[in-house]
């Protein structure tokens, strides 16, 4: 009798461990730094308030490369999470596999088409149907600065050109500080590279080279100048940069040890989480030469097809919460980004946020709005990976000539 009871209990436990609890939502994301964790906690709170069970599935690793690998293995094993942080053309690739749920019912009821900029809505759709929900718009072409470090070095204003940037870098070095805080993953290298190329060549060159992968643009003099400028930026970084996480690079600015960081505005989330005040403790400006352009990076969640009715309900609630005004405001105030919705008040946002919102709208009209390659918005993952590798090899090995790097990058682009 006792034995039977034990078996029944063990079976019940095994079943409950495997079956999805009604209303449970397992969410795969890569928001693990201080500012990121604070931001995603807001979504968890909203879902819990709606009575759902939030199962956190955080995979550390900036830029999400590690999370993408884990996601693949879960889907291949037939056990996808309810929702995953997926963006850009990767959304289309997953939808093409037939594994994503259709979010049109929620999108129609809540008029997503009316409140999202077309450039954002298009990325969320596959064959005209919504398969992902956007949480924000991040601007990638930012330059951050530590007010303390700039003061110590006598740098009075944020550099507007690359020449001014290098002059400020020299002053920082002279003051015994690290000029540029950099980390060591290929997405971080490319984050810097795409800002340099945008500043050197402008939005048309950026689009031709990195979105259209036009061989002419990839082998042009502008590309050469971009790589030369990029290599020069490296000489302003410290020897400990390889392997460093992006948030640790931001911490170097927070501590006043380094002057600048070229990074998207999730860096602002780190400054804020550390209690720092924009315009006082730290400064933001568009990366040199890029004030009239905007590299956009939209974080979004795709939902996977699930059979359980409770899980489906939780997914619909998650999609609706993500697009809700309450979440779009509180999340983006923490995350450093701006809301994806265009009908939001910006009065609670700081000057960096307000500038981002203004420039997003302005550059959409002038053609200066371009998708970030480093953050998976521009090209398919395979071509993106190949180009990033070629750029990182060049960054990491001073023996690789600019001419050789150009050949490698053009070859990677041709393999699209
Ligand atoms: C994501 C951000 C994230 C950053 C660092 C970017 O690709 O869009 O949400 O904070 O990577 O992990």
Image: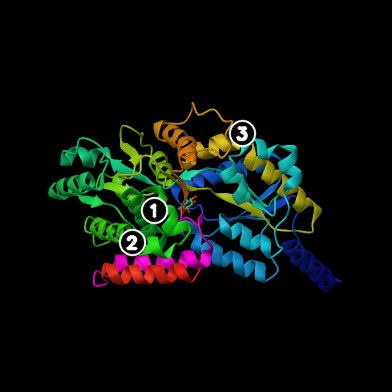
- Residue 327, quarter of picture: top right
As drawn, the label of residue 220 is 2
* Image: magenta residue range: 373-400
Q: Is residue 67 left or right of residue 286?
A: right
Q: Which residue is denoted by mark 1 in the rendering?
A: 205
Whichever of labels 1 and 2 marks the residue nearer the N terminus, that label is: 1
Disc 1, disc 2: CB below 8 Å?
Answer: yes
Nearer to us in this view, 393 or 289: 289
Q: Residue furthest right?
A: 1
Q: Position of residue 246 (x, y in %)?
A: 38, 54
Q: Is residue 219 left or right of residue 415?
A: left
Above or below, 38 relative to 248 = above
- What whole-number distance in Å separates the C-alpha atoms at marks 3 and 1? 36 Å
Callout 1: 10 Å neighbours few (<14), some, many (20+)? Answer: many
Callout 2: 10 Å neighbours few (<14), some, many (20+)? Answer: some
As drawn, the label of residue 325 is 3
Q: Is residue 310 left or right of residue 248?
A: right
Label tally: 3
Whichever of labels 3 and 2 marks the residue nearer the N terminus, that label is: 2
- Residue 185, quarter of picture: bottom left
Nearer to us in this view, 390 or 40: 390
Q: Residue at x 71, y 40 (%)?
A: 50
């Amino acid at each position: 009798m006792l034995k039977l009871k034990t078996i029944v209990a063990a079976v019940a436990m095994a079943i409950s461990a495997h079956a999805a609890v009604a209303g449970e939502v397992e969410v795969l994301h890569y928001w693990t730094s201080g500012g990121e964790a604070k931001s995603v906690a807001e979504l968890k709170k909203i879902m819990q308030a709606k009575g759902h069970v939030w199962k956190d599935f955080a995979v550390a690793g900036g830029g999400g490369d590690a999370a993408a690998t884990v996601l693949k293995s879960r889907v291949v094993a037939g056990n996808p999470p309810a929702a995953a942080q997926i963006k850009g053309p990767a959304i289309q690739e997953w939808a093409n596999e037939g594994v994503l749920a259709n979010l049109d019912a929620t999108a129609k009821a809540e008029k997503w088409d009316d409140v999202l900029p077309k450039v954002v809505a298009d990325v969320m759709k596959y064959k005209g149907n919504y398969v992902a929900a956007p949480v924000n718009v991040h601007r990638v072409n930012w330059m951050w600065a530590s007010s303390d470090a700039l003061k110590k070095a006598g740098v009075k204003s944020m550099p507007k050109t690359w020449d001014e940037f290098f002059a400020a870098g020299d002053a920082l070095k002279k003051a015994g500080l690290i000029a540029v805080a950099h980390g060591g993953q290929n997405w971080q290298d490319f984050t810097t590279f795409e800002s340099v190329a945008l500043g050197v060549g402008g939005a048309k060159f950026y689009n031709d080279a990195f979105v259209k992968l036009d061989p002419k643009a990839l082998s042009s003099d502008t590309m050469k100048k971009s790589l030369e400028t990029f290599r020069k930026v490296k000489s302003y970084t410290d020897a400990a940069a390889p392997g460093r996480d992006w948030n640790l690079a931001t911490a170097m600015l927070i501590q006043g040890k380094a002057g600048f960081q070229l990074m998207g505005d999730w860096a602002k989330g780190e400054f804020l989480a550390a209690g720092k005040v924009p315009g006082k403790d730290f400064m933001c400006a568009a990366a040199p030469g890029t004030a009239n352009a905007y590299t956009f990076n939209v974080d979004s969640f795709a939902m996977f097809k699930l059979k359980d009715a409770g899980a489906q309900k939780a997914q619909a609630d998650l999609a609706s919460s993500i697009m809700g005004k309450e979440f779009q405001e509180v999340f983006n105030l923490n995350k450093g980004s701006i809301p994806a919705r265009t009908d939001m008040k910006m009065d609670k946002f700081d000057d960096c946020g307000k500038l981002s919102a203004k420039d997003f709208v302005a550059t959409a009209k002038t053609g200066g709005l371009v998708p970030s390659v480093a953050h998976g918005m521009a090209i398919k993952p395979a071509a993106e990976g190949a180009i990033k590798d070629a750029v990182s090899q060049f960054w990491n090995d001073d023996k690789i000539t600019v001419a050789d790097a150009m050949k490698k990058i053009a070859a990677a682009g041709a393999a699209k």
